[in-house]
Image (cartoon, coloured by chain):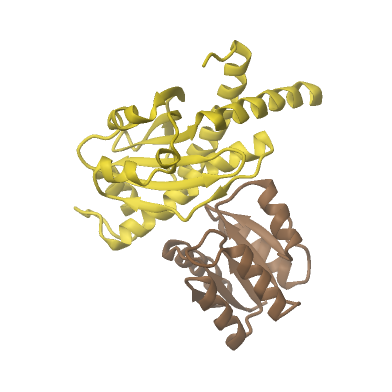
Amino acid sequence: MELTDQQKDALSEVINIAFARTAASLSELTGHRVLLDVPKVAIFPIDQLGAALAEFLPAEVATVHQVFTGPVTGDALLLLNYDGAITLADLLTDEKGSKRLNTSSREVLTEVGNILLNACLGMFGNLLQVHVSFSVPRMHLETLDALLRSLVIGSEGLRYALVVYTAFRMRDGSVKGYLVIALSVASLDRLIQEAERYEERQWKTN
Amino acid sequence: MMAKILVVDDSGMSRRTLRRILEPAGHQISEAEDGIAALEQYFIDKPDLVLLDLTMTGMYGIEVLSRLREMDSQARVIIASADIQSSTRSLVEEGGASAYINKPFAAEHVLDAVNRVLQGGAGGAD
């Protein structure tokens, strides 16, 4: 599927704004500066999604997963390196120097994931003027295979997934993570339409 | 103005944060982890104000809002949610919410919204 340069620009702008809002939310939560890489967009065959996500997932990770539905549908994931997840949880609780993610830490990280994923997808919704609904967020500390089984886009007989992702880091890299949005290619059509309308609204207002 | 405030959120972190913001301001806080518990507690305690999350296990906040307003047409409910969409804000305002504040919480925004709603004003945007 080929996008025109204009479509790529409009989509990139929406994605940049949404991910920047996410980084701002994380910074507000923790009081630390968050550095964000330039977001990337790629289309993967569904049966290669596991291998694609495995790039982001070293040995031990903590993942918060939320399903979103509406005119665009898919899975949103916050992926954190395990030690970084502990650091982040410690920042937000009264615990210091934890070695493992306990029940309290997991609960805190689930809420952090909820806030960040809502910030990202909510901003998409605002910019594109579509309404997105969210599932209750779930935290995973299990294998990639188990995580993939819970992805909604893999369960609908779809052949391709659009993946939008960016890496972020804070506290000199001790907390590293990825934001991953996976949606069906059918949702991509709608996303592009709305991104083009968003661009038109920009120059009509200005 | 001291008030009885019911905080409804399945996130312990959010409940703790709101308690830490509101108790020093003199308010009496009770908590509910889900919609059913919230409705029961509202019926029993008759709080002055409810701070209500939207995305919760079991009953979603929109339905809790609707049932609270059925139970008490004067119920004052501030939505406290991570959902930043303006369409969601419109939806809950149509459903009778008095105000809307976003996560992550900022103490001054929370207190400002609570004070405005308790004084009978509209909550406005966060």
Q: Quadrant of residue B49?
A: bottom right
Residue sitting at the far bottom? B44
Locate the N terminus of chain B by quadrant.
Answer: bottom right
Q: Nearer the viewer, residue B4 or A60?
A: A60
Whole-percent x and y of residue A25? 50, 44
Relative placement, left or right, of B5 versus A41 is: right
Residue nearest the viewer, comparing A144 with A141:
A144
Residue A38: tell me if it is visible.
Answer: no
Q: Residue furthest front?
A: A157
Chain displayed in yellow: A
Residue B6 lies left or right of residue A54; in this view the side is: right
Which residue sits furthest top? Answer: A5
Of the chain colours in the picture, the one used for chain B is brown
Where residue A45 appears, as percent x and y from the top left, is: 39, 25
Q: Position of residue B35 (x, y in %)?
A: 54, 72
**Is B41 above or below relative to B125?**
below
- Look at the picture and state if A186 lies above or below B15: above
Q: Is residue B63 visible?
A: yes
